[in-house]
Image (cartoon, helix red, strand yellow):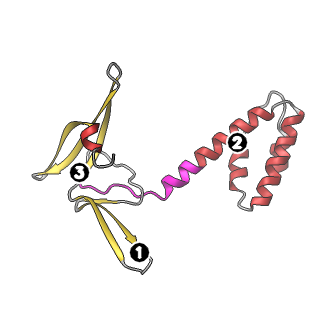
Amino acid sequence: MKDDYINGITKTSEFEDAMFIDILGTTDTIERAKYIEDVRKKCRDVNRLREFDNLLKAWITRNAQLLKQADSKNTEFTDAPLRLKCGKWTATDAGISIAEITKSGDIIKYTACPHPILPVERLVNIDTDTEKTKIAFFKDMRWRDMTVDNSILLWNFC
């Protein structure tokens, strides 16, 4: 397939998504570098090297984001208004927490919040350049929401 993709590059042809998927799917780093250099050589010959380099960079960035999201957990709240990625955090009806293993092998659990809470909407005032966040939280057996200034939400992190 590699040769087909490279031979298919002309001054007017579209770069095939499948070619970038094939490049990024090449796990051997030396083979991947050779593949990229072969494509770059062909692109240089047809005066499309900059276009290829820009697209490859975009594909690499997108691939890195997808890989990061693939390892991310999802929120698991009952009847939540939406479901979000929460990275390495555990977000359940019991609250939001993360467990870390120390060098000595002990597990330490950190709790960010003892009940379900979600950022639902981001509000930006373009006149004053201030931001507020609409958060949803579970209290008294139902989901409620409120809009809070970001300075209040984030003051512990500054």
Residue found 35% across the figure and 25% down from its top: 129
Quadrant in the picture for the C terminus: top left
| Mark 1: amino acid | Thr
| Mark 3: amino acid | Asp
Give the residues drawn in magenta, as a range. 64-79
| Mark 2: amino acid | Leu
Report which residue position mark 1 lands on. Answer: 102
Q: Residue furthest front?
A: 158
Q: Could you tell whether 11 is left or right of 69 in the image?
A: right
Q: Could you tell whether 40 is left or right of 28 in the image?
A: right
Tell whether position 58 is magenta: no
Could you tell me if the residues under marks 1 and 2 are in contact, i.e. CB atoms within 8 Å?
no
Residue found 35% across the figure and 21% down from its top: 126
Which picture quadrant has residue 119? top left
Earlier along the polypeptide chain: callout 3 or callout 1?
Answer: 3
Secondary structure at numbered mark 2: helix
Q: CA distance from mark 1 to mark 2?
A: 39 Å
Q: Please tell me the numbered disc located at residue 79.
A: 3
Q: CA distance from mark 3 to mark 1?
A: 35 Å
Name the residue nearer the viewer: 47 or 16: 47
Name the residue nearer the viewer: 89 or 1: 89
